[in-house]
Amino acid sequence: MSARILIVEDEEPLTMLLVYNLEKEGYEVETAARGDDADTKLKESAPDLVVLDWMLPGLSGIELCRRLRARPETQQLPIIMLTARGEESEKIRGLATGADDYIVKPFSVPELLARVRALLRRAHPDRVATVLNIGDIELDREKKRVSRNGRAVDLGPTEYRLLEFLMERPGRVFSREQLLDGVWGSEIYIDERTVDVHVGRLRKAINRGQLADPIRTVRGAGYALDDRFGRAN
Protein backbone atom coordinates (compact mmCIF):
# COMPACT_ATOMS: atom_id res chain seq x y z
CA MET A 1 0.00 0.00 0.00
CA SER A 2 1.40 3.40 -1.03
CA ALA A 3 2.03 6.10 1.55
CA ARG A 4 -0.44 9.01 1.55
CA ILE A 5 1.01 12.50 1.53
CA LEU A 6 -0.85 15.78 2.04
CA ILE A 7 0.71 18.89 0.47
CA VAL A 8 -0.44 22.14 2.08
CA GLU A 9 0.82 24.89 -0.22
CA ASP A 10 -0.84 27.94 -1.77
CA GLU A 11 1.60 28.41 -4.67
CA GLU A 12 -0.06 26.42 -7.45
CA PRO A 13 3.05 25.91 -9.65
CA LEU A 14 4.98 24.54 -6.68
CA THR A 15 2.05 22.33 -5.70
CA MET A 16 1.89 20.89 -9.23
CA LEU A 17 5.64 20.26 -9.21
CA LEU A 18 5.44 18.43 -5.88
CA VAL A 19 2.39 16.39 -6.88
CA TYR A 20 4.05 15.29 -10.12
CA ASN A 21 7.30 14.20 -8.46
CA LEU A 22 5.71 12.54 -5.43
CA GLU A 23 3.21 10.61 -7.55
CA LYS A 24 6.06 9.54 -9.80
CA GLU A 25 7.69 8.06 -6.68
CA GLY A 26 4.53 6.02 -6.10
CA TYR A 27 2.88 8.03 -3.33
CA GLU A 28 -0.81 8.90 -3.13
CA VAL A 29 -0.98 12.68 -2.98
CA GLU A 30 -3.69 15.08 -1.77
CA THR A 31 -3.47 18.87 -1.70
CA ALA A 32 -4.87 21.85 0.17
CA ALA A 33 -4.20 25.51 -0.62
CA ARG A 34 -5.43 26.92 2.71
CA GLY A 35 -4.41 26.11 6.24
CA ASP A 36 -7.99 25.91 7.51
CA ASP A 37 -8.98 23.56 4.67
CA ALA A 38 -6.01 21.36 5.51
CA ASP A 39 -7.05 21.36 9.17
CA THR A 40 -10.48 20.06 8.18
CA LYS A 41 -8.99 17.35 5.95
CA LEU A 42 -6.63 16.23 8.70
CA LYS A 43 -9.46 15.95 11.23
CA GLU A 44 -11.32 13.67 8.82
CA SER A 45 -8.39 11.44 7.86
CA ALA A 46 -4.70 11.64 8.72
CA PRO A 47 -2.21 10.92 5.92
CA ASP A 48 1.21 9.30 6.44
CA LEU A 49 3.11 12.57 6.02
CA VAL A 50 2.42 16.28 5.57
CA VAL A 51 4.45 18.74 3.47
CA LEU A 52 3.45 22.06 5.03
CA ASP A 53 4.08 25.63 3.87
CA TRP A 54 4.70 28.17 6.65
CA MET A 55 2.75 31.10 5.13
CA LEU A 56 -0.81 30.08 4.24
CA PRO A 57 -4.18 31.80 3.92
CA GLY A 58 -6.83 30.94 6.50
CA LEU A 59 -4.44 29.41 9.02
CA SER A 60 -0.66 29.62 9.13
CA GLY A 61 1.44 26.52 8.72
CA ILE A 62 3.09 27.08 12.07
CA GLU A 63 -0.31 27.23 13.81
CA LEU A 64 -1.53 24.15 11.94
CA CYS A 65 1.61 22.32 13.01
CA ARG A 66 0.96 23.33 16.62
CA ARG A 67 -2.63 22.03 16.43
CA LEU A 68 -1.55 18.72 14.90
CA ARG A 69 0.93 18.13 17.69
CA ALA A 70 -1.77 18.86 20.28
CA ARG A 71 -4.07 16.11 18.97
CA PRO A 72 -3.36 12.51 20.00
CA GLU A 73 -4.25 11.14 16.56
CA THR A 74 -1.71 13.38 14.78
CA GLN A 75 0.88 13.77 17.52
CA GLN A 76 3.35 11.49 15.72
CA LEU A 77 2.43 12.54 12.16
CA PRO A 78 5.63 13.29 10.16
CA ILE A 79 5.69 16.97 9.07
CA ILE A 80 8.09 18.66 6.67
CA MET A 81 7.89 22.45 6.84
CA LEU A 82 8.48 24.40 3.62
CA THR A 83 9.28 28.08 3.92
CA ALA A 84 11.12 31.03 2.46
CA ARG A 85 12.26 31.88 6.00
CA GLY A 86 15.89 30.80 6.10
CA GLU A 87 17.03 32.44 9.34
CA GLU A 88 18.32 30.08 12.02
CA SER A 89 15.89 31.51 14.58
CA GLU A 90 12.94 30.74 12.29
CA LYS A 91 14.20 27.21 11.69
CA ILE A 92 14.48 26.65 15.42
CA ARG A 93 10.95 28.01 15.88
CA GLY A 94 9.57 25.66 13.21
CA LEU A 95 11.27 22.61 14.70
CA ALA A 96 10.29 23.63 18.24
CA THR A 97 6.65 23.86 17.16
CA GLY A 98 6.78 20.23 16.10
CA ALA A 99 8.03 19.99 12.51
CA ASP A 100 10.23 16.93 11.91
CA ASP A 101 12.17 18.60 9.11
CA TYR A 102 12.56 22.09 7.67
CA ILE A 103 13.32 22.95 4.03
CA VAL A 104 14.01 26.48 2.81
CA LYS A 105 12.69 27.66 -0.58
CA PRO A 106 13.94 27.43 -3.25
CA PHE A 107 14.92 23.82 -2.71
CA SER A 108 16.10 20.76 -4.60
CA VAL A 109 13.26 18.35 -5.45
CA PRO A 110 15.56 15.28 -5.15
CA GLU A 111 16.55 16.48 -1.68
CA LEU A 112 12.90 16.86 -0.69
CA LEU A 113 12.13 13.36 -1.99
CA ALA A 114 15.06 11.96 -0.02
CA ARG A 115 13.81 13.61 3.16
CA VAL A 116 10.28 12.31 2.54
CA ARG A 117 11.66 8.78 2.16
CA ALA A 118 13.78 9.13 5.31
CA LEU A 119 10.84 10.31 7.43
CA LEU A 120 8.49 7.64 6.09
CA ARG A 121 11.13 4.97 6.61
CA ARG A 122 11.27 5.86 10.30
CA ALA A 123 7.53 6.37 10.81
CA HIS A 124 6.07 3.83 8.37
CA PRO A 125 8.76 1.39 7.20
CA ASP A 126 6.10 -0.81 5.58
CA ARG A 127 5.06 2.04 3.23
CA VAL A 128 8.48 2.54 1.63
CA ALA A 129 9.46 -1.06 1.13
CA THR A 130 12.49 -1.65 -1.04
CA VAL A 131 10.88 -4.87 -2.27
CA LEU A 132 7.49 -4.90 -4.02
CA ASN A 133 5.49 -8.14 -4.11
CA ILE A 134 2.38 -8.82 -6.15
CA GLY A 135 1.35 -12.45 -6.30
CA ASP A 136 4.42 -14.49 -7.25
CA ILE A 137 6.26 -11.48 -8.72
CA GLU A 138 8.95 -9.77 -6.66
CA LEU A 139 10.70 -6.52 -7.60
CA ASP A 140 13.76 -5.47 -5.59
CA ARG A 141 14.27 -1.71 -5.98
CA GLU A 142 17.73 -1.64 -4.43
CA LYS A 143 19.16 -4.49 -6.52
CA LYS A 144 17.07 -3.61 -9.59
CA ARG A 145 16.08 -7.27 -9.91
CA VAL A 146 12.79 -8.96 -10.73
CA SER A 147 11.85 -12.58 -10.06
CA ARG A 148 8.77 -14.72 -10.52
CA ASN A 149 8.21 -17.96 -8.64
CA GLY A 150 11.75 -17.51 -7.36
CA ARG A 151 13.26 -17.41 -10.85
CA ALA A 152 15.05 -14.34 -12.17
CA VAL A 153 13.26 -12.34 -14.87
CA ASP A 154 15.51 -10.51 -17.32
CA LEU A 155 14.06 -7.08 -18.11
CA GLY A 156 15.37 -4.10 -20.02
CA PRO A 157 15.45 -0.75 -18.14
CA THR A 158 12.20 0.50 -19.68
CA GLU A 159 10.33 -2.74 -18.98
CA TYR A 160 11.65 -2.65 -15.40
CA ARG A 161 10.36 0.91 -14.86
CA LEU A 162 7.04 -0.01 -16.45
CA LEU A 163 6.58 -3.01 -14.15
CA GLU A 164 7.60 -0.99 -11.09
CA PHE A 165 5.13 1.77 -12.01
CA LEU A 166 2.27 -0.74 -12.35
CA MET A 167 3.22 -2.67 -9.19
CA GLU A 168 3.12 0.52 -7.14
CA ARG A 169 -0.55 0.97 -8.06
CA PRO A 170 -2.16 -2.47 -8.54
CA GLY A 171 -5.64 -2.35 -9.99
CA ARG A 172 -5.40 1.21 -11.31
CA VAL A 173 -5.91 1.56 -15.05
CA PHE A 174 -3.46 3.87 -16.81
CA SER A 175 -3.89 5.32 -20.27
CA ARG A 176 -0.98 5.17 -22.71
CA GLU A 177 -0.47 8.89 -22.15
CA GLN A 178 -0.28 8.43 -18.37
CA LEU A 179 2.22 5.60 -18.75
CA LEU A 180 4.35 7.68 -21.09
CA ASP A 181 4.35 10.49 -18.55
CA GLY A 182 5.02 8.24 -15.56
CA VAL A 183 7.61 5.91 -17.08
CA TRP A 184 9.31 7.92 -19.80
CA GLY A 185 8.75 11.45 -18.49
CA SER A 186 6.64 14.34 -19.74
CA GLU A 187 9.56 16.07 -21.47
CA ILE A 188 10.29 13.18 -23.82
CA TYR A 189 8.21 12.82 -26.96
CA ILE A 190 7.42 9.21 -27.82
CA ASP A 191 4.50 7.88 -29.81
CA GLU A 192 1.80 6.33 -27.60
CA ARG A 193 2.01 3.04 -29.54
CA THR A 194 5.49 2.63 -28.09
CA VAL A 195 3.74 1.73 -24.82
CA ASP A 196 2.10 -1.26 -26.51
CA VAL A 197 5.50 -2.49 -27.71
CA HIS A 198 7.03 -2.34 -24.23
CA VAL A 199 3.97 -3.86 -22.55
CA GLY A 200 4.29 -6.72 -25.03
CA ARG A 201 7.97 -7.18 -24.17
CA LEU A 202 7.19 -7.05 -20.45
CA ARG A 203 4.47 -9.68 -20.82
CA LYS A 204 6.77 -11.95 -22.81
CA ALA A 205 9.47 -11.72 -20.11
CA ILE A 206 7.31 -12.28 -17.02
CA ASN A 207 4.88 -14.84 -18.49
CA ARG A 208 7.41 -17.45 -19.67
CA GLY A 209 6.27 -21.02 -19.21
CA GLN A 210 2.60 -20.17 -19.75
CA LEU A 211 2.28 -18.42 -16.39
CA ALA A 212 -0.83 -16.35 -15.72
CA ASP A 213 -0.66 -12.85 -17.19
CA PRO A 214 -0.87 -10.23 -14.41
CA ILE A 215 -1.23 -7.30 -16.83
CA ARG A 216 -4.78 -6.44 -17.78
CA THR A 217 -5.62 -4.69 -21.04
CA VAL A 218 -8.67 -2.44 -20.77
CA ARG A 219 -9.92 -1.75 -24.27
CA GLY A 220 -10.13 1.96 -24.99
CA ALA A 221 -8.60 2.84 -21.61
CA GLY A 222 -5.13 1.37 -21.18
CA TYR A 223 -3.34 -1.10 -18.93
CA ALA A 224 -3.34 -2.17 -15.28
CA LEU A 225 -1.66 -4.70 -13.06
CA ASP A 226 -4.59 -6.92 -12.11
CA ASP A 227 -5.16 -6.55 -8.37
CA ARG A 228 -7.05 -9.86 -8.39
CA PHE A 229 -3.81 -11.52 -9.48
CA GLY A 230 -2.19 -10.30 -6.26
CA ARG A 231 -5.05 -11.46 -4.04
CA ALA A 232 -5.31 -14.81 -5.70
CA ASN A 233 -1.74 -15.64 -4.90
Image: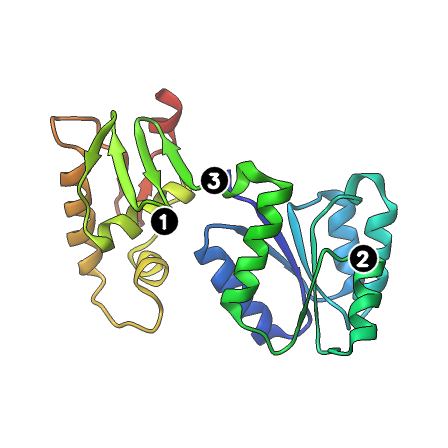
N-terminal of the pair, mark 3 or mark 2, is 2
Q: Residue at x 25, y 45 (%)?
A: 219
Where, by quadrant of the figure, is residue 182 drawn?
A: bottom left
Q: CA distance from mark 3 to mark 2?
A: 27 Å
For disc 2, the marked residue is 65
| Mark 1 and mark 3 residues within 8 Å of each other at the beta carbon | no
**Relative image position of residue 57 (x, y in whole percent):** 79, 71
Q: Earlier in the sequence, mark 1 or mark 3?
A: 3
In this rendering, the answer to whether 140 lies above or below 63 is: above
Between residues 87 and 221, which one lies in front from this camera angle?
87
Q: Residue at x 64, y 76 (%)?
A: 105
The residue wearing badge 1 is 165
Choose top left, top right, bottom left or bottom right for residue 163. Answer: top left
Q: Secondary structure at mark 3?
A: loop
Mark 3 nearby-residue class (10 Å; few <14, some 14–19, many ≥20): some
Instruction: Kindly identify the amino acid type of the residue bearing the numbered disc 3.
Output: Ala
* Residue at (60, 40) in percent of width and height: 124
Secondary structure beneath disc 2? helix
Say whether residue 220 is visible: no
Q: Quadrant of the C terminus?
A: top left
Q: Secondary structure at mark 1?
A: helix
Q: Position of residue 50 (x, y in %)?
A: 67, 55
**With respect to residue 126, does 31 lie above or below?**
below
Relative side of 195 to 174, left or right: left
Which mark is nearer the camera, 3 or 2? 3
Q: Is residue 13 above or below residue 27?
A: below
Q: Position of residue 69 (x, y in %)?
A: 83, 49
Answer left or right for 66 relative to 5: right
Furthest toward the top, the residue is 232
- In this orientation, which residue lies closer to the viewer: 99 or 214? 99
**Res 129 label:** 3
Q: Amino acid at mark 1?
A: Phe
